[in-house]
């Protein structure tokens, strides 16, 4: 009798899983990535970047397709894996962002009325305000001051955990120049606010709950939800402090806009805090690691910086005359792109992509990781080669380089992030020479931490630094 019950339960589970992962009839004409490797990847906690390179890109190349069907977040989603196809789609009218799973604690933290998740007129308002605020000035002097503070902490060098410094540096950069609040992350790495933020992000970054958001309904986590709410309240308090003490920063600029509601202001300060430092920190971790791996690139780049900037303080005009620095940054962001996918979108109309038609109201994602490693656009995509942005293939490389997204919905902080990287890297090259230890955890490939935003954030980036005399 017990065996029959067990057999019946197993049969029920098999049928339930089959129905859950079965491709809907209207999508069966699209090339489908095998579901079992995807399920195993999600359940193992594999990061998005590795899943794309290990499963999605090889499948797309074998099928010779620009679109693939991927099981993700409990449903089948179309992934666009080629740059030109992505650009043509994003130029279409009638596109809208897919409604985000309400139960995910990530969205409880960020809210839904910000430049990242908003649509229509709200998005236009937010994007305009953020763009104007961020482009009033590029705070080169502040980036330089924070770089010097970082070097003072490093001292004469030795082995350092570089990704720790990049997170602290980028947090103070976005705090002092964009939010108008000094988090003192460089001076106080274990400050209460920063520690609580990292605790919350670690708590909500459970692969199972990211993969299947409905778990928040079936197996709720009230203690973590309370942690999220307390952090949101801290951001609200921070916003009130900024209202009482305005300054030359983006949040003050937003507060001056009468159309911004309290909820919109709070949600935007949270996503600015999160997006403004995590992505750049990941980029800075990657580029310094790669320069430590490729000593010839480091030496060539140091020579360019010395010839253009010398011992002067960095200025905007310096960077317009450093083509190799620009190429190294672009290639580094391609090699380990800071953000892997754009938020899912829907179309009111059918979308033609090559030989395939995406039906209306089908969620699709611009898979930036796949695009930046697609061999149709990039010769030897797994190689680190900054010269691809300088040689005869430069036009093709530039056209396929999309780590900040596409079109008018590109990240509004693009210039801010790029100059933040240019200042720190150029000044670091003048102060130090560095290499990657032989026992690095990244000896096979750069290993990224799990991120609920599908970001590429290298962890345990140890480098051996020697101060130049």
Image (spheres, rainbow, N blue to C red):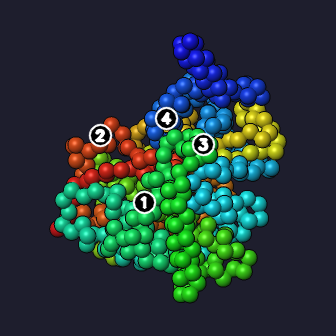
Q: Which mark is residue 443?
A: 2
Percent of width and height locating residue 69: 65, 32
Query: Which of the marked residues, 1 or 2, is nearer the chain's N terminus?
Result: 1
Q: Marks 4 and 3, how far apart in space?
A: 17 Å
| Residue 45, visible in the rendered structure | yes
Label 4 sits on residue: 43
Of marks 4 and 3, which one's residue comes earlier in the chain? 4
The numbered disc on residue 198 is 1
Q: Please state if 331 lies on the left or on the right of 61 as rendered.
A: left
Displayed quadrant of residue 444: top left
> Is label 3 or label 2 in front?
3
Return the x and y of residue 152 as percentages of the image width and height. Answer: 25, 72
Q: Name the residue rendered at 65%, 64% in the picture.
A: 114
Residue located beneath label 3 in the image? 218
Q: What residue appears at the point 71 percent right and 48 percent down from the top-left corner?
A: 98
Element carrying mark 4 = helix
Q: Nearer the viewer, residue 296 or 37?
A: 37
Left or right of 437? Residue 413 is: right
Q: Measure the alpha-carbon separation of dots 3 and 2.
A: 40 Å
Residue at the spot 56% in from the left edge and 12% down from the top edge: 1
Badge nearest the viewer, 2 or 4: 4
For this orientation, the residue located farthest to the front is 1
Q: Are marks 1 and 4 in contact (CB under 8 Å)?
A: no
Mark 2 crowdedness (10 Å alpha carbons): few <14, some 14-19, many ≥20: few
Label total for image: 4
Label 1: how many Cα within 10 Å (few below 14, some 14–19, many 20+): few
- Number of other residues with Cα within 10 Å of mark 3, as a class: few under 14, some 14 to 19, many 20 or more: few
Q: Relative to 148, is 46 above or below?
A: above
């Amino acid at each position: 009798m017990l065996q029959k019950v067990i057999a019946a339960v197993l049969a029920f589970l098999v049928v339930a899983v089959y129905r859950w992962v079965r491709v809907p009839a209207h999508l069966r004409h699209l090339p489908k990535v095998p579901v079992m490797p995807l399920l195993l990847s999600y359940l193992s906690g594999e990061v998005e970047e590795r899943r794309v390179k290990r499963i999605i890109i090889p499948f797309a190349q074998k099928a010779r397709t620009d679109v693939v069907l991927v099981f993700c977040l409990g449903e089948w989603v179309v992934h666009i894996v080629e740059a030109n196809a992505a650009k043509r789609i994003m130029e279409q009218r009638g596109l809208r962002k897919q409604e985000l799973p309400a139960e995910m604690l990530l969205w409880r933290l960020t809210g839904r009325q910000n430049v990242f998740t908003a649509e229509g007129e709200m998005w236009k308002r937010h994007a305009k305000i953020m763009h104007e605020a961020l482009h009033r000035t590029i705070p080169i002097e502040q980036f330089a001051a924070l770089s010097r503070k970082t070097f003072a902490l490093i001292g004469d060098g030795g082995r350092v955990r570089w990704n720790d410094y990049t997170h602290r540096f980028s947090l103070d950069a976005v705090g002092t120049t964009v939010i108008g609040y000094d988090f003192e992350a460089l001076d106080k790495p274990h400050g209460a606010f920063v520690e609580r933020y990292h605790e919350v992000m670690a708590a909500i970054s459970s692969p199972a709950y990211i993969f299947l958001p409905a778990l928040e309904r079936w197996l709720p986590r009230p203690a973590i939800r309370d942690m999220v709410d307390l952090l949101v309240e801290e951001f609200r308090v921070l916003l009130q402090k900024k209202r009482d003490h305005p300054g030359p920063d983006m949040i003050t600029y937003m507060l001056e806009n009468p159309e911004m509601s309290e909820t919109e202001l709070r949600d935007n300060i949270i996503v600015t805090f999160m997006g403004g430092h995590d992505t750049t920190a990941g980029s800075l971790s990657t580029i310094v690691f790669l320069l430590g791996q490729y000593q010839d690139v480091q030496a060539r780049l140091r020579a360019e910086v010395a010839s253009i900037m010398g011992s002067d303080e960095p200025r905007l005009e310096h960077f317009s005359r450093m083509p190799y620095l620009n190429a190294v940054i672009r290639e580094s962001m391609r090699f380990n792109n800071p953000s892997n996918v754009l938020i899912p979108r829907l179309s009111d109309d059918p979308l033609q992509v090559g030989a395939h038609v995406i039906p209306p109201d089908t969620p699709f994602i611009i898979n930036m990781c796949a695009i930046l490693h697609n061999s149709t656009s990039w010769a030897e995509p797994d190689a680190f080669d900054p010269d691809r942005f300088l040689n005869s293939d430069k036009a093709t490389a530039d056209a396929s380089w999309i780590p900040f997204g596409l079109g008018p919905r590109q990240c509004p902080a693009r210039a801010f992030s790029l100059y933040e990287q240019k200042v720190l890297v150029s000044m670091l090259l003048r102060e130090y020479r560095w290499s990657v230890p032989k026992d690095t955890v990244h000896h096979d490939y750069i290993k990224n931490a799990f991120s609920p935003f599908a970001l590429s954030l290298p962890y345990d980036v140890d480098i051996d630094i020697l101060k130049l005399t």
